[in-house]
Image: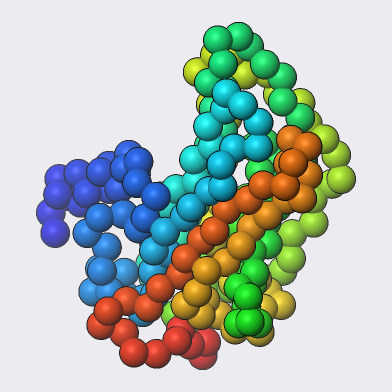
């Protein structure tokens, strides 16, 4: 692939507004037997806001998948919102019902390994956030967003088995709110990711 094509594909993936894996990703491109297939958010817990959860990058040999959470003030006036320790989202563990598996949203590179083990991006440790509340004022149309690396939690029984993982906060802006992330086996793959 020449440099210009690579940069064009990279820019298209970075700017894509979809909620599924970036277009053009397949097993031959990523080298991984699974994909971060989709992210689906609940309806916003308060009026006049929109919350988008989107897949920014899929799993690949040189990086874990990346997810973006974007919170937008859709009101006509500036508003102040109270979030947890990370703006706009800090519930970092998502569980897959019945799979004994947990995904971790890594807010920085601190627990992200340099390379995967086999085809498993597993956190090197847990993440502990301070129990604080942060206020942020957003002007009309302004968005607060954060990207997260998507890893198997360091204490997860299994690494990225296919299924839906639930990330939820029981008191997000005063109401329960969350989103689902789906990990799927690529059509050409036949096995669950392995660790070597």
The x and y percentages for residue 145 are: 55, 35
> Residue 18: x and y, percent?
34, 46
Q: Residue at x 55, y 10 (%)?
A: 76
Query: Do we see residue 157 in this rendering?
Result: yes
- Locate residue 4, reporting x and y percent: 15, 45
What is the quadrant of residue 100 in the picture? bottom right
Residue drawn at (31%, 69%) of the image: 30
**Residue 108 to residue 145: above or below:** below
Give the residue displayed 51% in from the left and 80% down from the top: 161
Q: Residue furthest top?
A: 77
Q: Is residue 59 above or below residue 174?
A: below
Q: Say whether residue 125 is left or right of residue 38.
A: right
| Count of picture labels | 0
Identify which residue, 194 or 81, lies in the foreground: 81
Residue 110: where, in percent of width, then height? 66, 57
The image shows residue 75, relative to residue 101, as above or below, that is: above
Q: How is the image coloured?
A: rainbow
Q: Is residue 78 left or right of residue 126?
A: left
- Along the line of sight, which residue is nearer the eye, 119 or 100? 100
Evaluate whether residue 113 shows in this view.
no
Rendered view: 186 above or below 114: below
Q: At 64% from the left edge and 58% from the top edge, which residue is drawn?
A: 167
Q: Nearer the viewer, residue 153 or 95?
A: 95
Q: Quadrant of the N terminus?
A: bottom left
């Amino acid at each position: 692939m020449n440099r210009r094509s690579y940069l064009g594909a990279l820019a298209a993936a970075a700017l894509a507004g979809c909620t599924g894996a970036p277009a053009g990703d397949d097993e031959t491109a990523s080298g991984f037997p699974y994909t971060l297939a989709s992210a689906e958010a609940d309806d916003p817990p308060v009026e006049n806001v929109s919350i988008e959860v989107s897949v920014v990058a899929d799993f690949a040999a040189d990086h874990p998948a990346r997810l973006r959470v974007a919170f937008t003030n859709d009101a006509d006036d500036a508003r102040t919102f109270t979030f947890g320790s990370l703006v706009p989202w800090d519930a970092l563990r998502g569980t897959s019902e019945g799979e004994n598996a947990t995904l971790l949203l890594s807010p920085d590179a601190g627990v992200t390994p340099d390379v995967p083990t086999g085809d498993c991006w597993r956190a090197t440790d847990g993440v502990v956030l301070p129990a604080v509340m942060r206020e942020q004022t957003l002007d009309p149309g302004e968005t607060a967003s954060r990207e997260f690396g998507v890893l198997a939690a360091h204490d997860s029984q299994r690494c990225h088995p296919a299924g839906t993982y639930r990330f939820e906060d029981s008191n997000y802006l005063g109401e329960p709110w969350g989103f689902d992330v789906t990990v799927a086996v690529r059509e050409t793959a036949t096995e669950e990711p392995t660790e070597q």
